[in-house]
Amino acid sequence: MKYMGSKRSMLGNGLGELLAGVLPDKQRFVDLFCGSGAVSAHVAENMQIETAAFDLQQYAVTLAQSSLGKIHEIKSKDLWSRWVARAVEWIDEFDVFGDAVMLSNEAIVVNHKNAVAAVKRARIFCEDLPDKFVISRAYGGYYFSPLQALTIDALRASVPRGVSRTSAIAALIRSASRCSASPGHTAQPFSLTSTATPHLISAWKKDIAQHTQNEFKNACESFALVLGEANVADAVDATATLREGDLVFLDPPYSEVQYSRFYHVLEAIAQGYIGDVSGTGRYPAIEERPQSRFCRTTQSLEELDRLMIGVAASGAEAIVTFPADQASNGLSGILVEAISSQYFHIQKRKISSSFSTLGGNTRSRAARKQATELLLHLTPR
Ligand SMILES: C[S@@+](CC[C@H](N)C(=O)[O-])C[C@H]1O[C@@H](n2cnc3c(N)ncnc32)[C@H](O)[C@@H]1O
């Protein structure tokens, strides 16, 4: 899954090695900004250590929990068949499926004018659906074709109960992220210009049920070696739960744009709920989008200081990563290093490359650009 600031590529490029060197004598790994869950899942699935993860956003916690929260593989085949059967039963209560298929197919045409007209009809159809069609009403005709949106709603309303529930919701989040008609994140769907419409239509052609089945299989197959847990919490508040013997991974935001602006579609799927939406991105109201002080240029420095004091007070060790260059939220590798060194000894300092700066630093907002990341191993003073 493409995720702004994901450290997946860094795991094979310095971070994985550092974790493998530091973790053996620790009691717990704690990821305070888990995001895509790539780092917590890597540790939980490969190392004999309890892993805890936190994030402000529910979708991030769901992604992490789907591997941290179970210690056995789940056989997904029958669960998937029963999940689909319940979803079909759910949708059959409404007489809308045939129209959704027809409207989705009408948009898949080469002629730009006809495609735009069909997309507009799809939007009206989706907005008029009953309230139970949470995702379709908010995002159908924009990020998803009517057929894709109805499929998400039907699957979300019918997720299995029990231990596979989190894996099922995680699978839907991942498949929605893969199929969404938007560039890399869900801040805005592709527009209806002649250059962008083909991208929208190409995304609308994706088989979201097939993607969900694949993601569900993967999620069911991944498990932690030691049972862990992921929770929604503010990272600074979560420092109160830390203890000596923990290795804390700190990968705070570097963008002045809130993550909740980029990922509200995934949050709505995780929550199974979204209020009224507005604007080109179909955003929910600001009160429904978690706001991080790390993404505010006037508060980010103070927040980083509070975070470092919280971790240091617990006696835990930490690994912190941050772009070496000036970031758009006002922080930089130099500032992160200076604040860290007030409370910690810097045991190791590495520079690593990553390829994910979506919405990133002040120099370029290009979707994929090589960025240089500072990587510090901190031990208490
Ligand atoms: C740079 S990303 C982390 C990426 C993650 N390490 C990965 O590999 O995918 C920063 C994350 O911090 C979360 N976040 C922002 N402010 C936070 C806060 N105050 N407390 C907890 N999480 C926060 C965001 O929702 C986002 O998922």
Image (cartoon, rainbow, N blue to C red):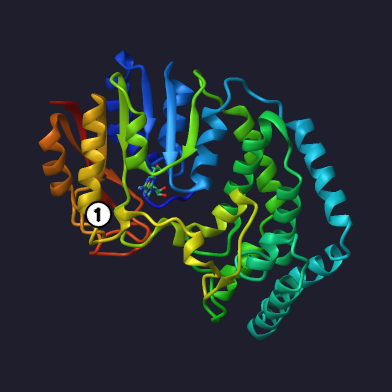
The picture places residue 20, in percent across and down from the top left corner, at 32, 22
Q: Secondary structure at mark 1?
A: helix
Q: Residue at x 23, y 61 (%)?
A: 298
Q: Amino acid at mark 1?
A: Ser
In the picture shown, does residue 27 fall above or below 190? Answer: above
User: Quadrant where the C terminus lies?
Assistant: top left
Apparent side of residue 371 relative to residue 76 in the rendered image (left or right): left
Within-10-Å neighbours for mark 1: few <14, some 14–19, many 20+: many
The picture places residue 29, in percent across and down from the top left corner, at 37, 25
In the picture shown, does residue 319 fall above or below 145? Answer: above
The picture places residue 128, in percent across and down from the top left corner, at 75, 73
Which quadrant of the view contains residue 350?
top left
Single out the residue that lies furthest toward the top.
25
Q: Residue at x 23, y 43 (%)?
A: 306
In the picture shown, does residue 204 fall above or below 172? Answer: below
Q: Is residue 373 visible?
A: no
Q: Is residue 176 visible?
A: yes
Q: Residue at x 33, y 55 (%)?
A: 357
In the image, the residue with mark 1 has its CB under 8 Å from the nearest atom of ligand 1 = no
Q: Compare residues 197 and 87 and report the one nearer the observer.
A: 87
Residue beneath label 1, please?
300
